[in-house]
Amino acid sequence: MIPPVDLSGAQWFKSSYSNNGGTCVEVAPNFPGLAPVRDSKDPQGPALVFPAEAWKSFVSAVRSGEFGDI
């Protein structure tokens, strides 16, 4: 389990592939070894924090179509 992380200094990034549909996530890449992720519609809401390698694997699986049309 990852201990609580202070995200007050997070520099949030939304993919350039995102559109204005309101279904975007943002990632803060300025935390070495971690990947904080939040809902772009609720920037003051909670964030999930994943190990960076796990997030990288998830993104790779999505890009390669491993989850089908979900």
Image (cartoon, rainbow, N blue to C red):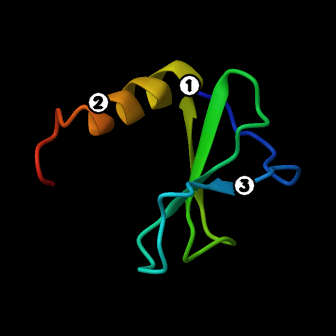
Q: Report the disc number at residue 51.
A: 1
Give the mark toward the camera: 2 or 1.
2
Q: Which residue is drawn at 67% across and 31% down?
A: 3
Q: How many numbered marks does the figure carry?
A: 3
Pointer 1 and pointer 3: residues touching (CB < 8 Å)?
Answer: no
Give the mark toward the camera: 1 or 3.
3
**Mark toward the start of the polypeptide (2 vs 1):** 1
Q: Nearer the viewer, residue 31 or 61?
A: 61
The residue under label 3 is 12
Horizontal and vertical percent position of residue 14:
61, 58
Horizontal and vertical percent position of residue 63:
31, 37
Q: What kind of residue is marked 2?
A: Ala
Q: Nearer the viewer, residue 43 or 70?
A: 70
**Mark toward the start of the polypeptide (3 vs 2):** 3
The residue under label 2 is 61
Q: Which residue is drawn at 47% across and 72% down?
A: 19
Give the secondary structure at mark 2.
Answer: helix
- Hey, which residue is sitting farthest right in the picture? 9
Pointer 2 and pointer 1: residues touching (CB < 8 Å)?
Answer: no
Q: Quadrant of the C terminus?
A: bottom left
CA neighbours of label 1 inside 10 A, class few (<14), some (14 to 19), many (20+): some
Q: What kind of residue is marked 3?
A: Trp
Give the secondary structure at mark 3.
Answer: loop
